[in-house]
Image (cartoon, rainbow, N blue to C red):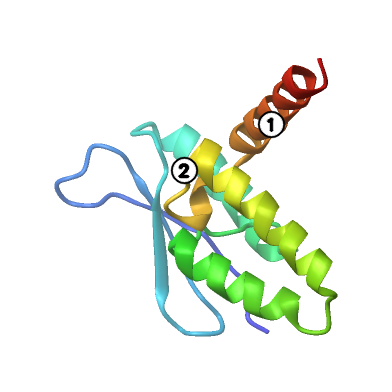
Amino acid sequence: MQEIKVHVVKSKGRTNLSLRYVDPDSGKQVWKSAGTANPKKALQEAGKWQAELREGRYQRTSRMPWDEFREQYERVTSDGQKLAMVRNYASALNAFEALCRPTRVADLNTAKVTAFAVELRHERKRRDG
């Protein structure tokens, strides 16, 4: 397997520098902003991204729509599960959607899940008195 090498690139018409590498599987170039115009900081960002890519820790933001994800998730998890478990999953997802209103899978982050858990605890306290 070809080793990934992230390069810092100055893109025409852009303030910030860009980071680029060639995906060894597809052969396509993958780009993202370095988030800075400072070459030293961009090199640091390139090093971090390169390490994440080589170690398999980098997760690209998912652009999958939430409703598509939910449909796929329910289809996969319902196979071989008891009806009660399937209903529990659906109930939890319904509550999450009502409180957090996700539109894409990428909307699912630590802050939203934490806020959801806190809200569920508050609801339980109100209900139980």
Taking depth in this image into account, of 32 and 102 the one nearest to the observer is 102
Q: Is residue 122 visible?
A: yes
Q: Relative to residue 78, is residue 110 depicted above or below?
A: above
Instruction: Kindly identify the residue that appears in the image at 42 percent across and 43 percent down.
Output: 34
Residue holding disc 1: 114
Q: Position of residue 16 (x, y in %)?
A: 30, 39
Circle 1 residues within 10 Å: few <14, some 14–19, many ≥20: few
Disc with the residue nearer the chain's start (1 vs 2): 2
> Mark 1 to mark 2: distance in Å?
14 Å
Q: Position of residue 123 (x, y in %)?
A: 70, 25
Taking depth in this image into account, of 69 and 8 the one nearest to the observer is 69
Q: Verify CB contact (< 8 Å) between mark 1 and mark 2.
A: no
Q: Position of residue 22 (x, y in %)?
A: 47, 73
Secondary structure category for the residue under label 1: helix
Identified by mark 2, the residue type is Arg
Q: Is residue 41 left or right of residue 35?
A: right
Residue holding disc 2: 101
Labelled disc at residue 48: none
Taking the view exactly as shown, the residue that stands out farthest to the top is 129
Q: Is residue 3 visible?
A: no
Q: Is residue 12 left or right of residue 126?
A: left
Identified by mark 1, the residue type is Thr
